[in-house]
Amino acid sequence: MRLAWPAPRHLIVPLLISVAALAMVHLSPPSLAAFLSLLSLILVFPVPGYLAVLWAYPGKGDLSPKGRAVLSLGASFLVAAVAGLVLWATPRGL
């Protein structure tokens, strides 16, 4: 496997979004916790679908930007549904 340095932006940005969402949830004052939790969920939701589409279609010419966005949101719904099903099926959950 060939390593790329510096790391590509399309892999760094989802990581930074996730870290920012974690910081918003855990470091926020209690009065803003409900609002920031919802905001962080909205920020983090498309990340797994985006990475799945990036893995499936790595080339820039494979999909149009609109197709990539729609497929990314669809993959996010699919990943969330499968994760929910797995958590529901486990005897202890989280």
Image (cartoon, rainbow, N blue to C red):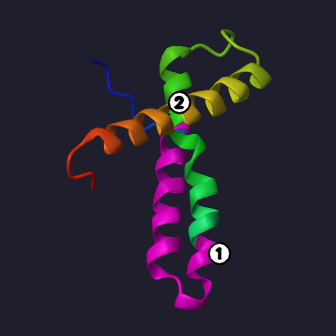
Q: Which residue occupies the foreground of this view, 94 or 55?
A: 94
Q: Are marks 1 and 2 in contact (CB under 8 Å)?
A: no
Disc 1 crowd rating (10 Å Cα; few below 14, some 14-19, many 20+) is: few
Q: Identify residue type, mark 2.
A: Leu
Report the residue marked by disc 2. Answer: 78
Seen as rendered, the residue at the extreme top is 62
Does the rendering let one see residue 8? no
Q: Measured from the top left, where is residue 18 in percent x and y?
A: 48, 55
> Residue placed at 65% from the left, 75% from the top?
35
Q: Is residue 33 magenta?
A: yes
Query: What span is in magenta?
Result: 10-36
Q: Nearer the viewer, residue 13 or 93?
A: 93
Question: In this image, 70 relative to 53: left or right?
Answer: right
Against 25, residue 58 (above or below) is above
Q: CA distance from mark 1 to mark 2?
A: 25 Å
Residue 82 locus on image (x, y percent): 42, 33
Residue drawn at the location 63% of the way across and 28% of the way down? 74
Q: Quadrant of the N terminus?
A: top left
Q: Which residue is mark 1?
A: 35
> Disc 1 residue type?
Phe
